[in-house]
Image (cartoon, rainbow, N blue to C red):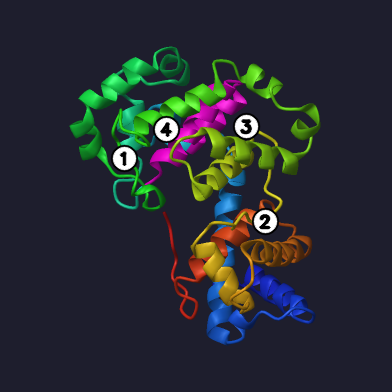
Amino acid sequence: MKRPGLYNKIKDSLDEYQLTTDLPGINTPANENSFISQLIDSISRVKFIETIKSRPISQIRKDPTSNIFDPIRASILYNQEGNKLEAFWLIFLFTHFGKHNITKYGLLKCFYSKNNSADIFNYLEVEADITECKFWMNNNQINLKNSGKFSNHRKYQSLNSYSPNGTGDTIESFINWVGDNFNDFLARIPLAILNDRYLLFEYLYKEASKNIIGFGRLACFDFITMLGKVGIFECEPKSPYINCSTGPLKGTKLLFNTSGNTTPKDLDDFLKDLGDHLENDLGLKFTMQIMEDAVCNWQKSPQNYIPFNG
């Protein structure tokens, strides 16, 4: 049993929830154990960001030529230092390139360090001359491909500088969306939205979906959620956003044993209701990402807990 104290709290909360709402997908001990274990993993991933934010972070974490470079820790540092654009940029790069299970941040490091040079592709440099950035990428395709791979969720992405939906277009579309000044970016957001963490998440999610080439539902959800967890924006999803997903929809259908005519909106509402219950009982943060992540991983092996990363 993983983390028995938390495990038992989750089990008690699920038992209470099932007094009024059936969860047929976890009506066996094996399925219930697998689901609770996935919830614990998802909770731990969220709490990990809170933990590293509360601790001192070495400046070396910013250096993409270092073995201990970490885009998330680097983003936290830049955000704490007031360099919001670079913090924003690093979370974008982290979302786009990801962390591969074997090559780790190799691909991201190669791009950001310009193939292990003393210079880096910081945000303002790329924003000032996106043409040069795409030209460099085109001339360094072999180095980029040899440096690492996209994460599992981004494995179908292209490194091409100039093809539609390639990395060059993805980066250029992000630059065009954000602009050259973070305060100007904020000024475009209505104040009523900016002051509501849930409305702000929805706004940023929709804007990212509309503006960033190659970012689908999962990329946008993970991207905006990470911006909130790092603290670049005060935002948090109010629902799991599983509409148009694959794994989370399948997992939610299995959990609630819904009929074939249940809509994705219904499933999103079902999972949100369960998430709200767990949040109230356990005092969770970013609960909707926890739910989306947990049901996605659980449905891959509902009877036998297997840790999933990537």
The stretch in magenta equals 72-99
Which residue position is annotated with label 2?
Answer: 287
Mark 2 and mark 4 lie on one chain; the one further toward the N terminus is 4
Could you tell me how far apart the alpha carbons at marks 2 and 1 are, in whole angstroms? 32 Å
On the image, the x and y values in percent for residue 176 come to 50, 22
Residue at horizontal 62 percent and vertical 32 percent from the top: 232
**For residue 106, side relative to residue 188 (left or right):** left
Kindly state the secondary structure of the residue where label 3 is placed.
loop
Which of the two marks, 4 or 3, is nearer to us in this view? 4
Mark 1 and mark 4 lie on one chain; the one further toward the N terminus is 1
Residue at horizontal 79 percent and vertical 27 percent from the top: 191
Which residue position is annotated with label 3?
Answer: 232
> Is residue 82 positioned above or below 215 on the image?
above
Which residue position is annotated with label 4?
Answer: 170
Contact between marks 3 and 2 (CB within 8 A): the answer is: no
On the image, the x and y values in percent for residue 146 come to 20, 39
Q: Tell me, for residue 158, which label it has, or none.
A: 1
On the image, the x and y values in percent for residue 185 come to 63, 22
- Residue toward you, 118 or 18: 18
Question: Callout 2: 10 Å neighbours few (<14), some, many (20+)?
Answer: many
Residue 187 visible in image: yes
Residue 73 falls inside the magenta stretch:
yes
Could you tell me how far apart the alpha carbons at marks 1 and 3 are, in whole angstroms? 28 Å
Could you tell me how far apart the alpha carbons at marks 1 and 4 are, in whole angstroms? 10 Å
On the image, the x and y values in percent for residue 260 come to 58, 76
**For residue 215, side relative to residue 22 (left or right):** left
